Image: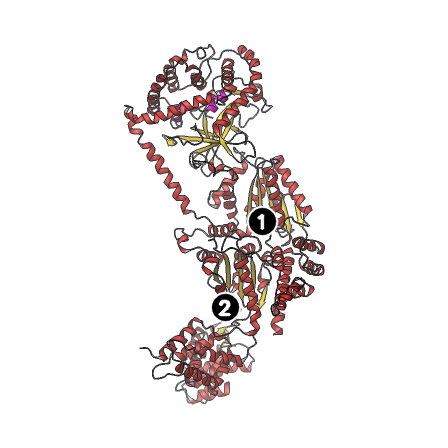
C-alpha cells in the first residue's frame, strides 16, 4: 500500500470531529502513490460509473477539506472529507442553465456543489491533482484546459440553497459560507486558543519528503522574504506541512500588503514560473520515489500558484493556529459591509497575477518556456472540435413538426372521444388506490432508509400496472422536489422495447450515465457500480416492464437484476412488472426467485363496479353517456377480460357511432330550427354500445360464413 | 405523329400495369367501411388522435384499393407534405423487425437527415425510433400513418416487438399515429400475443365480396373504357368504347371470361389478361377482337405442368398414365415403381410399340421424380427401402394429363387409347 501520512496528527475543532462518532486522527498532508495531497488541494476522484474512471473527462473534481484515518474501518482506514464540484453534464436537469451568460462550458467549467452530497470518500479513489480557478460570473479565464498533464478547470457558479433552481455566483456563495463558518467558530475560538497553547510542538518535517519539495519550499521562503519577516510566519510553531505554510503566506498577503510594494509581487511572477519550469525539468532526473510519481508530481507546482478561497476558508477552520484564526476573524470583522472576505481579495489578486503570468510568458527569456508555451493553445484547440464532431454524428431523435395546428374536436361527443382514448392521461387513477399506496410506501421506505429491495408486480394486460407505477414515480418525484425525499435516479426499461435481453444493461447504463457501451461492458460496469459505494452515490429506482421477456436459458439477466438490490451498497429498488402471476415459480430458477424475494403485488382484473368508475371518471361531468350503457360495457368487459383498455375502446367506438348517427339524422335536415334538437340526439345509448360491442367481439369466421 | 391507337394503347397498358384506374368504383357495400377508415385517418391527421385498425378480407377483395382511395381522399383535404407522413410496410418485404425498423426510419426521416448517420445495430435503431416517437408532441409533430400490408406476417416476428411498440405508442399519448393493418387471415387477432392484443384497439373491418359474374364483366368493360381527352378524339373514344362493350357481349369472350372467373375472380388476373391482349394493338389491328381475348386468356391461364408434360418422352408419359390408373383403382393409395412397371408391361403385352427394360423405366421414373410429377410419400425414409419399392404420390391431375396428351405432337395412337381407358 503506497500510502503514508506526512507530519503528525493535527487537531480540529469539535464540530468536525463529531461528524462520525468513531475515533479519527486528522492529518494535514498525505502521500499517496507518490503524490502529496494537502488540505485545500483540488483533486481528481475516480468516477466508478464511467467507462474510464480515471480519464479527466469523466472523473469527479473536489477539494480536500479534511483528511483523517479511522482505525475502526479496517478495509479503508484512510478517508477524506471533500467539497464537490460538478461538471455541467452532471448537473440536475431542472437547473436554470440558460440564463447564464456566457454560456456554461461543457468541457472545463465546474459548479460548486455546496452541501448536496456527502463528501466522505476514501483517499484511494483520488488519483491526481488539478487546479480550479474561481472566477467572476461573466468572465471565462484563460489557460483552462489540460496543459502538461495538469487539468485546469474554472468555476463561476455555485448551486444555490437546497431546492433552488438558480445558479449563484461562486464567490458570493463562498464568502457567505466563510462568514457562516467564522461566525460559528467565533465562539469556539477562545477555547481553541487555550487548547492550542497546550499542544506539543510538532517536528518540522519528515525525512521522506522529496528533495524537490524542500527545494520548492526554499524557493518559496526566498520569494517572500518580507512575508517571512511578518510576525505571524515567524511564530515558533510552524505548520507541519508546507501547504499550510504556503496558505499562510497567501492569506497573509492582503493584510501584509500594506507594507509590501506592489512591484515586488509583480516581480515574483516570472520567478515563480522559472521555478515551476525548473521543477518539471527536474522531475524525470530527480529522485523519484515511485515510478508513478513522475506523472503525478508535475501538477503540484501550478496548483500552488493558484489557490482558491476555499483553501483559505478550510484552513481557517482546520488550523489549530489560534492566532491565524483570530486574524481570519478579524479580517471578516474588518470587511463585513463590503461582503467580500479577505480570502476573496486574495484570490482576485491571484487571478490577476495569473493573467499577467499568461501575458508575460512569451516575453520571458527562459528557453524552456518559449518552447512550451505555443503548444498550449494548439492542444486546447484540437480537443474541442473532436468532441463537437462526435455530437453531430449522434442524431437527436425527433419527428419533423407539422405546419398546421391540431384542431381539438369541438362537438361534445368529440370531447368524449378524446377523454375516452386509452392514451388520455387521467387526473387520478381510480380503483387502484390500495395498490398505489402499497407501491408508494414500499419505494418511499426503501428510499428513506437508503436500502435496496425488489417488488414483483403482476396482473393481466390492461389492469393498470404500468400506469400505477408511473403514477407512484410521479408522486415520488414531486415529494422529492419538495425536499421530503432524498434525490433518486429513475431508470425505466421495457422488455418489449429491447431487441435482446442483454440489451437491458446497455439501456440501464445509458439512462444512468448517458453514455453508450456494449452489453458486456455495461454489465461489468453495472456490477462495479452496484457493488461499490462510489462517491456521490444516489439511490436508484429501476422499473422493469414486461419482465418475462428478459428470460434467457441461463437466466443471467434476471439473476443480475434481482441480485443487485440485495447488495448492501447498491441502494437499488427494483419494480418488476409482468403479466403472469406465477412467473417466479414457473419460469425462474430457485436462485433467481429467491433473490426476487417475497414482496409481490397482484393486480386483479377490474370488476364491474371498477370499470364503471373508470369510464365515468373519464367522462367527468359530461352526461351524454347513458348510465345503463356504461354499466353494460363494464359488465361485458369484466366478463371477458377485465381489461380497462377494452372498456375504453368500446365506449369510444360507441361514442363514434353515436356521433355518426346524429350526423346522419341531422345532415338531411340542416335547417336552423332543428339545431336545438341536436344535443339530445348526441347521447350514447344502449344501441350504440350494442353495435360497438358486436363489432369488437364478433368472430370473423362467423361473419365469413354468413356472407 | 402518334396515332390514336398508340395513345390508347399506352394509356390502357399503363392502367393495367400500375393499377391506376380510378374508374373501378369501390363496391357499394364497402362505402361504409371506406368512410369508417377515412374518418379514422382524418381524426389522426386533423385531431392528432392515435388509432389502430385491421382490415380483414380475402385476397383480391379490394383491401389495398380501399386504403389507396382513402389516402387519395385524404390528400385532397390535408397537406401531405406538411401534416402527415404515410409509411407503407409490407409483410413480405419487411420480413423481420430489423428491416422493418430500418424501413420506417428511412421513410419517416428525410433522406438527408439520415444520410450521414450510418445505420447502427438493431437495438440502436429501435431505441432511436422509440425515442423519436416518445419525444414527439401530440400537437406539434406530423401525424404518422402506418399501412401494413400482409399484416399477419408481422405477427411472426420475434416477440412481436414491432407490433407491441407501434400499438403501445398508439395507446399512450405519444406521437400521433394510426396503424392500419391489411390481412387476409380471419384469425389475425388471435395471432397477437396477449399484451399486444390488449393494446390493439380491436377495430376490425371485414371486407367480404360475393363473387358476381355480372359485376366481373362490367369491370371488364370499365377497365377498357376510355375518357375523351386532348389527345384522343371524341369519335375515336366513342368507337373504342363501343367496341369494348361489344366485346364483352361476345359469346366466345363471355364463355372464356366465365371460365376465368370461376377459376379465379381476382381483378389482377383480368388485368394481366387484358395486358397481353392490348399489347397486340397496332396500326393494322386497331380494335380488340374476341380472338385476342381468348388467346390472352389461354396464355395467362395455361398450366405450367401441362406444358412440362408435353416435353416428356413417350415412356415417361406411359408410366405416368399407369400410375394415374393405379391411383384411380386404389382410390388414391400411393404406388411404387414395381407396381407401375408391372402395369406398364401388362399394357405392352400385345402392343406393337417398343418395349423398354426395367433399368430404362427406372431411369424414367427417377426423371419424373426430379421434375416433381411424383413425390415419395413422407415418413418412409428412402434409405431403408429399395429404390423399386419407394411409394410415390402422383402430383398431377387427370385434367392436366388429358390436356397434355391432346397437345402432344406425334403421340402413338396406342398411348392415346391407353389414356382414354386410364383416365
Mark 1: few/some/many CA within 10 Å (<14, 14-19, 20+): many
Q: Which of pointers 2 and 1 indicates the residue nearer the eye?
A: 2
Q: Main secondary structure of the magenta part?
A: helix
Q: Secondary structure at mark 2?
A: helix
Q: Report the disc number at residue B69.
A: 2
Give above or below for A417 relative to A101.
below
Mark 2: few/some/many CA within 10 Å (<14, 14-19, 20+): some
Classify residue B292 by image quadrant. Answer: bottom left
Q: Which residue does the numbered mark 1 point to in the structure image?
A: A545
| Quadrant containing the C terminus of chain A in the rendered view | bottom right
Residue B279 coordinates in the image, percent (x, y) = 38, 78
Q: Is residue B76 magenta?
A: no
Q: CA distance from mark 2 to mark 1?
A: 40 Å
Residue A83 coordinates in the image, percent (x, y) = 50, 28
Q: Which residues are magenta?
A: A295-315
Viewer-closest of B94 and B323: B94
Viewer-closest of A639 and A22: A639
Residue B344 makes an appearance in the image:
no
Q: Chain of mark 1?
A: A
Q: Chain of mark 2?
A: B
Q: For the point 57% across and 20% down, which residue is it?
A: A184
Residue B314 coordinates in the image, percent (x, y) = 41, 83
Q: Secondary structure at mark 1?
A: strand
Is A647 displayed left or right of B349 in the figure?
A: right
Q: Report the disc number at residue B284.
A: none
Viewer-closest of B186 and A433: A433
Amino acid at each position: 500500500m503506497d500510502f503514508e501520512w506526512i507530519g503528525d496528527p493535527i487537531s480540529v475543532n469539535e464540530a468536525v470531529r463529531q461528524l462520525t462518532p468513531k475515533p479519527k486522527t486528522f492529518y494535514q498532508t498525505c502521500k499517496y502513490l507518490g503524490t502529496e495531497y494537502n488540505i485545500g488541494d483540488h483533486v481528481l476522484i475516480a468516477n466508478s460509473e464511467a467507462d474510464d474512471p480515471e480519464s479527466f473527462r469523466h472523473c469527479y473534481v473536489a477539494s480536500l477539506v479534511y483528511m483523517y484515518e479511522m482505525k475502526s474501518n479496517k478495509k479503508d482506514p484512510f478517508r477524506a472529507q471533500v467539497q464537490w464540484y460538478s461538471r455541467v453534464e452532471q448537473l440536475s436537469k431542472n437547473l436554470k442553465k440558460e440564463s447564464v451568460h456566457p454560456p456554461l462550458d461543457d468541457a472545463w467549467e465546474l459548479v460548486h456543489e455546496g452541501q448536496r452530497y456527502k463528501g466522505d470518500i476514501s483517499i484511494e479513489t483520488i488519483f491526481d491533482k488539478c487546479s480550479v480557478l474561481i472566477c467572476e460570473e461573466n468572465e471565462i479565464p484563460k489557460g483552462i484546459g489540460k496543459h502538461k498533464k495538469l487539468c485546469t478547470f474554472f468555476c463561476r457558479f455555485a448551486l444555490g440553497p437546497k431546492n433552488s433552481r438558480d445558479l449563484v455566483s461562486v464567490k458570493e456563495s463562498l464568502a457567505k459560507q466563510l462568514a457562516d463558518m467564522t461566525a460559528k467558530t467565533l465562539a469556539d475560538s477562545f477555547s481553541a486558543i487555550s487548547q492550542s497553547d497546550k499542544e506539543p510542538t510538532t517536528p518540522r518535517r519528515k525525512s521522506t519528503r522529496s528533495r524537490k519539495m524542500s527545494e520548492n519550499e526554499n524557493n518559496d521562503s526566498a520569494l517572500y522574504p518580507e512575508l517571512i519577516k511578518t510576525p505571524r510566519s515567524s511564530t515558533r510553531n510552524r505548520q507541519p506541512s508546507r501547504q499550510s505554510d504556503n496558505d499562510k503566506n497567501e492569506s497573509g498577503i492582503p493584510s501584509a500588503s500594506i507594507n509590501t510594494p506592489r512591484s515586488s509581487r509583480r516581480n515574483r511572477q516570472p520567478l515563480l514560473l522559472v521555478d515551476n519550469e525548473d521543477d518539471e525539468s527536474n522531475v524525470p532526473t530527480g529522485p523519484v520515489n515511485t515510478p508513478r510519481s513522475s506523472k503525478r508530481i508535475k501538477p503540484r507546482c501550478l496548483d500552488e500558484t493558484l489557490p482558491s478561497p476555499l483553501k483559505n476558508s478550510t484552513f481557517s477552520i482546520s488550523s489549530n493556529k489560534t492566532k491565524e484564526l483570530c486574524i481570519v476573524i478579524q479580517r471578516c470583522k474588518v470587511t463585513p459591509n463590503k461582503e467580500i472576505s479577505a480570502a476573496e481579495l486574495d484570490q482576485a489578486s491571484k487571478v490577476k497575477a495569473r493573467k499577467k503570468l499568461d501575458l508575460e510568458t512569451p516575453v520571458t527569456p527562459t528557453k524552456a518556456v518559449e518552447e512550451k508555451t505555443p503548444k498550449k493553445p494548439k492542444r486546447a484547440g484540437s480537443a474541442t472540435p473532436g468532441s463537437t464532431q462526435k455530437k453531430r454524428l449522434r442524431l437527436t431523435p425527433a419527428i419533423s413538426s407539422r405546419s398546421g395546428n391540431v384542431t381539438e374536436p369541438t362537438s361534445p361527443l368529440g370531447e368524449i372521444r378524446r377523454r375516452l382514448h386509452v392514451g388520455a392521461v387521467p387526473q387520478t387513477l381510480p380503483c387502484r388506490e390500495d395498490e398505489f399506496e402499497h407501491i408508494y410506501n414500499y419505494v418511499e421506505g426503501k428510499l428513506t432508509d437508503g436500502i435496496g429491495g425488489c417488488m414483483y408486480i403482476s396482473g393481466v394486460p390492461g389492469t393498470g400496472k404500468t400506469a400505477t407505477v408511473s403514477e407512484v414515480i410521479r408522486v415520488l418525484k414531486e415529494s422529492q422536489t419538495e425536499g421530503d425525499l432524498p434525490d433518486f435516479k429513475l431508470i425505466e426499461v421495457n422488455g418489449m422495447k429491447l431487441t435482446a435481453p442483454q440489451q437491458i444493461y446497455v439501456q440501464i447504463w445509458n439512462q444512468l450515465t448517458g453514455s453508450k457501451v456494449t452489453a458486456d461492458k455495461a454489465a461489468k460496469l453495472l456490477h462495479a457500480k452496484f457493488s461499490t459505494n462510489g462517491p456521490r452515490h444516489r439511490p436508484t429506482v429501476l422499473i422493469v416492464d414486461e419482465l418475462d421477456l428478459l428470460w434467457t436459458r441461463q437466466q443471467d439477466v434476471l439473476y443480475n437484476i434481482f441480485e443487485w438490490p440485495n447488495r448492501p451498497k447498491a441502494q437499488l429498488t427494483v419494480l418488476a412488472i409482468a403479466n403472469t402471476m406465477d412467473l417466479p415459480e414457473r419460469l425462474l430458477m430457485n436462485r433467481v426467485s429467491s433473490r426476487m424475494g417475497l414482496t409481490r403485488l397482484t393486480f386483479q382484473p377490474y370488476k364491474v363496479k371498477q370499470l364503471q368508475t373508470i369510464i365515468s371518471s373519464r367522462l367527468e361531468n359530461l352526461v351524454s353517456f347513458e348510465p345503463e350503457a356504461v354499466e353494460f360495457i363494464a359488465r361485458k368487459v369484466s366478463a371477458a377480460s377485465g381489461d380497462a383498455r377494452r372498456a375504453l375502446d368500446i365506449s369510444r367506438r360507441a361514442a363514434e357511432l353515436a356521433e355518426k348517427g346524429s350526423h346522419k339524422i341531422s345532415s338531411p335536415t340542416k335547417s336552423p330550427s332543428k339545431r336545438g334538437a341536436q344535443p339530445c340526439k348526441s347521447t350514447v345509448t344502449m344501441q350504440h354500445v350494442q353495435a360497438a360491442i358486436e363489432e369488437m367481439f364478433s368472430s370473423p369466421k362467423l361473419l365469413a360464413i354468413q356472407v | 405523329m402518334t396515332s390514336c391507337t398508340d395513345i390508347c394503347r399506352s394509356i390502357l397498358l399503363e392502367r393495367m400495369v400500375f393499377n391506376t384506374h380510378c374508374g373501378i368504383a369501390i363496391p357499394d357495400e364497402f362505402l361504409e367501411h371506406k368512410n369508417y377508415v377515412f374518418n379514422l385517418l382524418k381524426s389522426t391527421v386533423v385531431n392528432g388522435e392515435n388509432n389502430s385498425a385491421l382490415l380483414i378480407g380475402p385476397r383480391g377483395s379490394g383491401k389495398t384499393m380501399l386504403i389507396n382511395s382513402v389516402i387519395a381522399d385524404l390528400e385532397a383535404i390535408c397537406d401531405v407534405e406538411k401534416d402527415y407522413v404515410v409509411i407503407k410496410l409490407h409483410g413480405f418485404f419487411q420480413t423481420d423487425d430489423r428491416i422493418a425498423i430500418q424501413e420506417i426510419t428511412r421513410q419517416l426521416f428525410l433522406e438527408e437527415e439520415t444520410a450521414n448517420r450510418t445505420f447502427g445495430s438493431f437495438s440502436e435503431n429501435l431505441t432511436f425510433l422509440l425515442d423519436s416517437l416518445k419525444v414527439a408532441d401530440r400537437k406539434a409533430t406530423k401525424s404518422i400513418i402506418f399501412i401494413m400490408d400482409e399484416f399477419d406476417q408481422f405477427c411472426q416476428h420475434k416477440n412481436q416487438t414491432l407490433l407491441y411498440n407501434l400499438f403501445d405508442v398508439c395507446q399512450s399519448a405519444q406521437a400521433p399515429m394510426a396503424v392500419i393493418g391489411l390481412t387476409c387471415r380471419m384469425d389475425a387477432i388471435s395471432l397477437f400475443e396477449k399484451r399486444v392484443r390488449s393494446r390493439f384497439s380491436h377495430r376490425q373491418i371485414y371486407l367480404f365480396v360475393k363473387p358476381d359474374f355480372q359485376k366481373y364483366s362490367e369491370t371488364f368493360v370499365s377497365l377498357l373504357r376510355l375518357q375523351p381527352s386532348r389527345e384522343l378524339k371524341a369519335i375515336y373514344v366513342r368507337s373504342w368504347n363501343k367496341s369494348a362493350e361489344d366485346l364483352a357481349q361476345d359469346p366466345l369472350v363471355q364463355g372464356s371470361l366465365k371460365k376465368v372467373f370461376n377459376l379465379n375472380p381476382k381483378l389482377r388476373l383480368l388485368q394481366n389478361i387484358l395486358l397481353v391482349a392490348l399489347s397486340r394493338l397496332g396500326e393494322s389491328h386497331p380494335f380488340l377482337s374476341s380472338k385476342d381475348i381468348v388467346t390472352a386468356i389461354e396464355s395467362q391461364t395455361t398450366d405450367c405442368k401441362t406444358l412440362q408434360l408435353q416435353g416428356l418422352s413417350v415412356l415417361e408419359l406411359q408410366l405416368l398414365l399407369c400410375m394415374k390408373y393405379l391411383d384411380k383403382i386404389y382410390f388414391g393409395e400411393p404406388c411404387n415403381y414395381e407396381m407401375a412397371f408391372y402395369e406398364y408391361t401388362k399394357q405392352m403385352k400385345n402392343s406393337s410399340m417398343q418395349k423398354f427394360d426395367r433399368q430404362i423405366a427406372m431411369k424414367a421414373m427417377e426423371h419424373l421424380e426430379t421434375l416433381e410429377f411424383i413425390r415419395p410419400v413422407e415418413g418412409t425414409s428412402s434409405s431403408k427401402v429399395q429404390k423399386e419399392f419407394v411409394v410415390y404420390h402422383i402430383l398431377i391431375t387427370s385434367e392436366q394429363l388429358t390436356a397434355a396428351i391432346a397437345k402432344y405432337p406425334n403421340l402413338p395412337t396406342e398411348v392415346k387409347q391407353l389414356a382414354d381407358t386410364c383416365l
